[in-house]
Every structure is written in C-alpha cells, then in structure tokens.
Image (spheres, grey):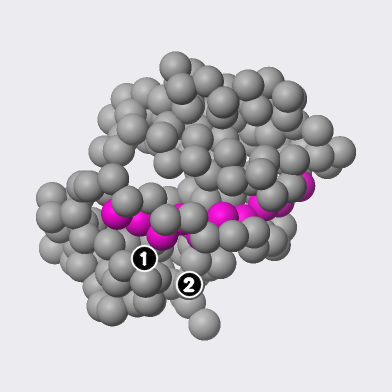
Amino acid sequence: MAPAYGSWWEYRLVGGDELVAKYDPRGAVVGSVSRAEVRAEGHWHAAAVVLVRSPDGEQVYVHLRSPDKDVFPSAYDCWAGGVVAAGETPAECAGRELAEELGIHGVSPVPLFTLVYDRPPIRCHNFAFEVRWGGPIIHQPEEIVGGDWMPLPELRAWADDPTSPLVPDGRLGIQEWFRRYG
C-alpha cells in the first residue's frame, strides 16, 4: 500500500526530480526514469487521465492549463491527470491527480480504456478513467489557471474542430470517448 501523499511524493523524488514509471511500447512497466529524462529523451511512459462529468453526465469539467506546464502549456484540457510515478498504478495515479489538480476526494475513478499517444518526443500510454462529481473544484494554481463545466455537445464540437484550443492528446482521448460512449 502506498504511503500518504506527502511521504509518497518524497519517495518519488530523485535528485529533486520526479521518478516516473518507464513503459515499453506495448504498455508494460520496464523500470523507472526521471521525469526530466522522459521529456528530454522521449521515453515511453504512462499517464492517468480522468474525465470529470457532472452528476447527470451531461457536462464535463474543462480546465485551462498553466503557461508553466512542460507539455501543452496554456491549452484547454477535458482530462485531469498526470504521469504515473514509479511504483504507482494508473488507478492510484488517477486518484492522486484528481486530488492534486482539482481537489476532488472520495471518488473511485472508473477505468475506461487506454489510448496510445505516440508523437515524439511524447510517447505515452494514457489510461483513461471517469468520475461523476458535483462538489467543489479547487484548482492547483501551479497547474491550472481556471476551468468550468462544458456541455457534451459543445465539447464534441471542440473535439471535432482541429483549430479548437484542446490539448492534442486530450482531443484524441475525448474523440475516443465519444466514439465508445457518446
């Protein structure tokens, strides 16, 4: 069992950099590597991404990423999430990222599908999850500038419009979600 978030985070830091799970192209964990190395060398890694839907399922929470993000800064995303840490499962990552980014606690993300994003230098297995949430949203200011609920038809229009401001991997993920569930 993973330690509490504070000590878990300390465990994942190596030389001041986050230690993340290294994956192979097929989606199996093959070791660990620093986050800086993943970004610099284009290693395969994984992310847990969570679609946050309103209690009635008719809206999705969409947020604006910080201009300081190392990947897709100042773009909109309909998935909360992040890179899977060394020793962490995608499901554990999904819960951790929901708590960190949006202040969502006490929910169990439901697994949906895995989508491969292979556009070097980003090579990632995105493990997609979903939750329903009607409580408060508290943004992590280092990662999220703001956000709001978006009706599904409007999100579908954004997903289908290549000029919309959605992050590229998030666009592919929500297109897959609409293909399967919408």
Magenta range: 123-132
- At horizontal 52% and vertical 20% (from top left) the residue drawn is 161
**Vertical comparison of 100 with 161: above or below:** below
Q: Secondary structure at mark 1?
A: loop
Residue wearing tag 1 = 85
Q: Residue furthest top?
A: 163
Question: In which quadrant of the rendered view does residue 16 lie?
Answer: bottom left
Q: Amino acid at mark 2?
A: Thr
Side of 100 where 61 appears, left or right: right
Residue wearing tag 2 = 89
Q: Secondary structure at mark 2?
A: loop
Side of 23 where 98 appears, left or right: right
168 is within the stretch colored magenta:
no
Q: Which mark is residue 122?
A: none
Question: Quick one: quadrant of the C terminus?
Answer: top right
- At horizontal 66% and vertical 44% (from top left) the residue drawn is 179
126 is within the stretch colored magenta:
yes
**Magenta segment, prevailing SS (helix, strand or loop):** strand
**Vertical comparison of 36 with 103: above or below:** below
